[in-house]
Image: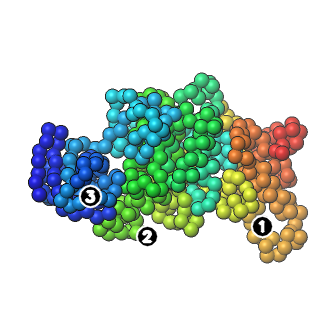
């Protein structure tokens, strides 16, 4: 094996071992962790990779495009002396890129001299600003009961076959048009979306493209697509490349950026694959022991800082294997993030869209972003009452499955009717329906009016006097 020193960095001819997407380079090399490398095969074709591990006289390199066609003797590896950087610019909005930031839409590379490290910088906790500004998604089950705030990370837990793709596209489309209550409408021009898809099928990628294009949202969206037949190693870079652009737009250009990452389960599967090839000791269900810290390095690149008017809000989407919420991926995600939106298969089977199950869903920051001057003064009490009433519906349904619905008391019968109406009128809405927060709250009061006043213990007498039955009186009832 020969080592050649070129002006641009070190170059090694020949590698020690090729295994899966991994190269093991041996020799007297002086390189660092996460350094970018260029790999040339015997035909002169160029691939890129990065260093995963450095040891005495060796380096482990992951190749983004895979190692197919590489030989031990005919491979040249050139170390570039620094981590992976991608161009960042406002002109990247309205464009579609692959997982490494290369254009997929036929357009040119972004014309900018600004390049940023994809690994980003952790936000100093003392520099953070607490999230308090409401984001209107137009989806009642989120806006009314699990409110999303600027600077929050709120994941979406789904399962195979459920409409999380449609819900993600709807959030992107409607949040682009939305703005926090009380702000001037011009502020919506500073709202941008960064969308990253990891390991998605071609038809899913086409769905997102067409959805954003037809709605006009694509002009404010930068898409990073890693398809199912793309190298799994690239999936480890895709969310970091997307967040790098988001950090530039938020903290240097002052924009409010919504980052949607789908599907984080595919990302974790790629991480597990690389970990197994490296021979690392597996942890729960074969995932590496550092899965928590790796996910945190993505999720924690979210928030607001004192030195910028911009913000990054993150909605990671993941599919739970076998609908198991205790699986390592949703389990660790729930620890790191500030709540979760859970999709339910029973609601989906009953034709409810979006099938958001209210009881296991949670937004831990909701209480700080709602109320007078932000949404509406009755929002907090109304959401608590709706949650409590629906929780009682679940108890009544369990009892009815044992003794029969006809044996229930009059009040419990009313709760059953409330539960059906709640799912059909509050949770359920069409894919194109964009509800204002006022509309969502009015529907909630209309549904509570199906219950006796004495059952409403979470709202004040003044709120009952003002809103009880208002949906029927003012014609705001849901169709």
Instruction: Tell me the crowding category of disc 2: few under 14, some 14 to 19, or many 20 or more residues within 10 angstroms, Cα based.
Output: few
**Mark 2 or mark 1, which has the lower sequence index?**
2
Q: Which residue is mark 2?
A: 285
Q: Which residue is mark 3?
A: 70
Q: Between 442 and 383, which is closer to the camera in this rendering?
A: 442
Q: Is label 1 in contact with label 3 (beta carbons under 8 Å)?
A: no
Left or right of residue 343: residue 473? right
Left or right of residue 374: residue 253? left
Residue 149 position within the rendered picture, expressed as x and y whole percent measured from the top left: 57, 40
Instruction: Tell me the crowding category of disc 1: few under 14, some 14 to 19, or many 20 or more residues within 10 angstroms, Cα based.
Output: some
Mark carried by residue 289: none
Q: Is residue 403 above or below residue 72?
A: below
**Mark 3 or mark 2, which has the lower sequence index?**
3
Single out the mark in the foreground, 1 or 3.
3
Q: Is label 2 in a helix, a strand or a loop? A: helix
Q: CA distance from mark 2 to mark 1?
A: 35 Å
Q: Is residue 338 visible?
A: no
Q: Residue at x 52, y 45 (%)?
A: 260
Residue 292 position within the rendered picture, expressed as x and y whole percent measured from the top left: 41, 58
Q: Is label 3 in a helix, a strand or a loop? A: loop
Mark carried by residue 397: 1
Q: Could you say which quadrant of the image residue 273 lies in?
A: bottom left
């Amino acid at each position: 094996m020969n080592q050649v020193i070129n002006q641009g960095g070190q170059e090694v001819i020949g590698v020690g071992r090729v295994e899966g997407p991994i190269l093991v380079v041996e020799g007297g090399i002086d390189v660092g962790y996460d350094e970018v490398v260029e790999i040339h095969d015997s035909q002169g074709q160029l691939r890129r990779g990065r260093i995963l591990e450095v040891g005495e006289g060796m380096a482990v390199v992951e190749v983004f495009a895979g190692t197919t066609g590489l030989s031990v003797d005919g491979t040249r590896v050139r170390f570039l002396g620094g981590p992976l950087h991608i161009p960042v610019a406002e002109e990247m909005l309205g464009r579609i890129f692959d997982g490494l930031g290369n254009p997929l839409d036929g357009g040119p590379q972004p014309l900018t001299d600004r390049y940023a490290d994809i690994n980003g910088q952790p936000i100093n906790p003392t520099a953070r600003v607490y999230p308090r500004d409401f984001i209107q998604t137009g989806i009642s089950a989120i806006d009314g009961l699990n409110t999303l705030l600027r600077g929050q990370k709120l994941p979406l837990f789904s399962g195979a076959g459920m409409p999380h793709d449609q819900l993600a596209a709807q959030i992107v489309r409607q949040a682009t048009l939305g703005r926090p209550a009380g702000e001037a409408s011009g502020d919506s021009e500073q709202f941008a979306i960064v969308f990253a898809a990891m390991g998605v099928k071609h038809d899913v990628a086409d769905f997102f493209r067409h959805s954003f294009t037809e709605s006009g949202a694509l002009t404010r969206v930068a898409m990073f697509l890693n398809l199912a037949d793309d190298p799994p190693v690239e999936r480890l870079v895709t969310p970091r490349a997307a967040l790098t652009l988001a950090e530039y737009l938020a903290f240097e250009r002052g924009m409010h950026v919504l980052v949607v990452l789908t599907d984080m389960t595919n990302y974790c599967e790629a991480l597990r694959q690389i970990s197994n090839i490296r021979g690392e000791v597996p942890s729960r269900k074969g995932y590496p022991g550092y899965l928590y810290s790796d996910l945190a390095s993505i999720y924690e690149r979210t928030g607001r800082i004192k030195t910028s008017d911009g913000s990054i809000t993150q909605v990671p989407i993941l599919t739970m294997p076998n609908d198991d919420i205790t699986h390592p991926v949703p389990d660790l995600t729930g620890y790191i993030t500030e709540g979760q939106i859970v999709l339910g298969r029973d609601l989906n089977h009953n034709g409810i869209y979006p099938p958001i199950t209210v009881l296991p869903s949670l937004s831990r920051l909701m209480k700080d972003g709602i109320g007078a001057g932000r949404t509406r003064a009755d929002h907090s009490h109304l959401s608590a009452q709706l949650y409590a009433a629906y929780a009682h519906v679940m108890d009544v349904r369990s009892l009815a499955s044992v003794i029969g619905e006809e044996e229930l008391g009059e009040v419990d019968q009313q709760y059953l009717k409330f539960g059906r109406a709640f799912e059909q009128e509050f949770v359920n809405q069409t894919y194109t329906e964009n509800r204002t927060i006022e509309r969502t709250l009015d529907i909630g009061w209309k549904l509570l009016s199906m219950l006796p006043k004495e059952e409403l213990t979470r709202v004040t007498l003044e709120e009952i006097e003002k809103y009880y039955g208002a949906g029927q009186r003012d014609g705001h009832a849901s169709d």
